[in-house]
Amino acid sequence: MLAGCIVATAPACGGSAESVGDGDAATSADGASSTSDGGAGADGGSSDGGDGGGADAGHGAGVGCTQDSDCNGDLSVSSDWGFCYQGVCMCHEGFWVQTNGKCNTTPPPGCTQQGGTCRQATSACQPGELESSASTKMSCGDLIEAVCCFGEAQCTGPDFRCCGPNGGTPGPICENGWRTCPSDATPLPVDRPCR
């Protein structure tokens, strides 16, 4: 979901196992608008929130993107595989953020390979942790409900909320070291409620 990223910003850690929109438009804090389908805002510009993120934009360091086209993992592709929001890529369905921050078709590796922790007893991440994408969560087991969790400091990107279809509030999630939203959710500033 992120593009033009600094590869060194993605964490390379060992993990541990523990056995315990609908197309509505959203407006960012600076007034730029975006749609949950990842298109450009009503002003025709990038849906990145305008500031492009930056090293001081939140957790981690580096900027994944400054415009929507930065999110394509293959520069020869003319369609957008995701869109840029405050310096991080939000990938469309069927694409995942890669360690370089760009969207591509390769699903993220398992939870512990990314430095996450599998939790089974509570099936919930602890305060200060972010959940993984659904495909990574499955690496923790699917017979007993489990979740893959990452410390917030392991995930590059600013603080934002994710608004799902019908007003749900999933995520944000951590994918390959990048803070992002699930593909069916729209990012909004943390002080903006989901509709």
Image: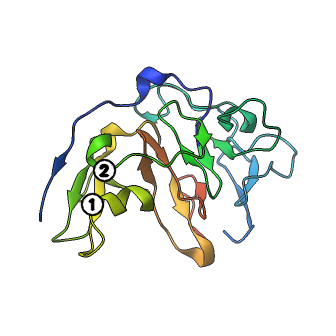
Q: Is residue 43 above or below residue 191?
A: above
Name the disc covering residue 64, or none: none
User: Mark 2 belongs to which amino acid?
Assistant: Cys
User: Mark 1 belongs to which amino acid?
Assistant: Cys
* Residue drawn at the location 59% of the way across and 63% of the way down: 185
Residue position marked by numbered label 1 in the rendering: 140
Circle 1 sits in a helix, a strand or a loop, which is it?
Answer: helix
- Residue 22 appears in which quarter of the rendering? bottom right
Q: Residues within 10 Å of mark 2 (few under 14, many from 20)?
A: many
Percent coordinates x, y for residue 9 in the rendering: 42, 25
Residue position marked by numbered label 2 in the rendering: 111
Q: Is residue 86 visible?
A: no
Labelled pair 2, 1 in contact (Cβ < 8 Å): yes
Question: Foreground: 183 or 140?
Answer: 140
Horizontal side, residue 176 vs residue 76: left or right: left
Percent coordinates x, y for residue 132 in the rendering: 38, 55
Percent coordinates x, y for residue 175 in the rendering: 44, 46
Question: Foreground: 104 or 130?
Answer: 104
* Residue drawn at the location 53% of the way across and 55% of the way down: 181
